[in-house]
Image (cartoon, rainbow, N blue to C red):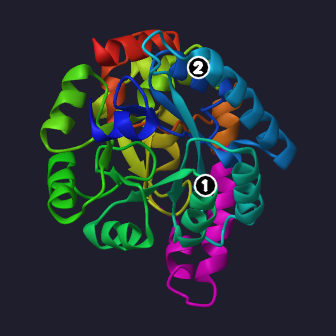
Amino acid sequence: MTNLTQLLDIKYPIIQAPMFLVSNTAMVIEAMKSGIAGCIPALNYRTLDQLRAAIKELKAAKVEACLPDKQGGSFGFNLIVNKSNIKYKAQLEVICDEGCDFIITSLGSPEETIKQAHAKGIKVFCDVTDLKFAQKVERLGADAIIAVNDQAGGHRGNLSPEDLIKLLVANCNIPIISAGGVGSKADIDEMLSYGAAGVSVGSPFIASTEAGVTQEYKQACVDYGADDIVMTERISGTPCTVINTPYVQKIGTKQTWIETVLNKNKTLKKWVKMIRFSIGMNATKKAATKATYKTVWVAGPSIEHTKAILDTKDIVAKLVN
């Protein structure tokens, strides 16, 4: 038992990490049945009605997910809380109205989220990559910190799991949940040995039967490994980890010279980033949800441990046994 299992009333100290386009209610329901927590990006739902329906489905499923020892699973949603997410305020309102166990905030100040969520009894965990922001969110009242290290998939941090966990544990008074570099039970044990209260695991669940992506994307997580993960600036303008497919090799991982020049212009920089983000997200969505030669598949090095496409419950079993 750890601080995370107590905080979320789960059997194992694992959060199935929220993944853009990948996460869905089917995955989270199976995660809860397996005694862990699951989380979905609110942006995976195009409309507020779809988001509301997902919450209702998960609440109903949670009642049935309780194990004999009464330690079932928990579910939550990830919110992008900066100004770039124009849906943020409305999404937060729906989540607070309908209720869930926790919210994970990313890319911005969690102050308003913490205020509204706590009023409804919802816990708030905050993504951080350094000590300065960790201490800030703790002062704002966060319930736990998601420590995003340099082994995470997607947008990752700069510090190793050991360095980041130990730094935050030594200087913060709320639970630290490690995100990145976990694909096996040995990895979980290692993170806990550094002082983490639990782990957030994403990439291994891409190759789950329940994941809402193509078989090609899932199979790529089986066929490729840690050495095949590269950083690219071609998705959002911010370095992001992807599988080094022939298409990624063809288009390169650096910004074009035009983007580099425009990004130095204070007036145009914001618009260039917005355009690059839009283009990159559309390319990622097409690659994840339909057959295309433009294979831009986001993943982290923990796919090294992915040897087959499995049910979510079997992935959890591999992580805890």
Q: Position of residue 306 (x, y in %)?
A: 37, 18
Q: Secondary structure at mark 2?
A: helix
Is residue 271 magenta-colored? yes
Which of discs 2 and 1 lies nearer the camera? The answer is 1
Q: Position of residue 10 (x, y in %)?
A: 42, 28
Is residue 313 magenta-colored? no
Quadrant of the drawing holding the C terminus? top left
Q: Earlier in the sequence, mark 2 or mark 1?
A: 1
Q: Is residue 90 above or below residue 4?
A: below
Q: Is residue 47 above or below residue 190?
A: below
| Amino acid type, callout 2 | Glu
Q: Nearer the viewer, residue 50 or 96?
A: 96
Left or right: residue 53 compared with residue 186: right
- Is the residue under label 1 in contact with that under label 2 (CB below 8 Å)? no
Q: Is residue 5 above or below residue 141?
A: above
Quarter of the image where one finds residue 12: top left
Label 2 and label 1: CA atoms lie apart by: 28 Å
Number of numbered discs on residues: 2
Q: Nearer the viewer, residue 305 or 281?
A: 305
| Amino acid type, callout 1 | Leu
The segment highlighted magenta reads 255-283
Q: Position of residue 280 (x, y in %)?
A: 62, 53
The residue that label 1 is drawn on is: 79
Is residue 55 at all visible to an observer of this figure? yes
Quadrant of the drawing holding the N terminus? top left
The secondary structure making up most of the magenta span is: helix
Q: Residue at x 49, y 74 (%)?
A: 260
Q: Which mark is residue 216?
A: 2
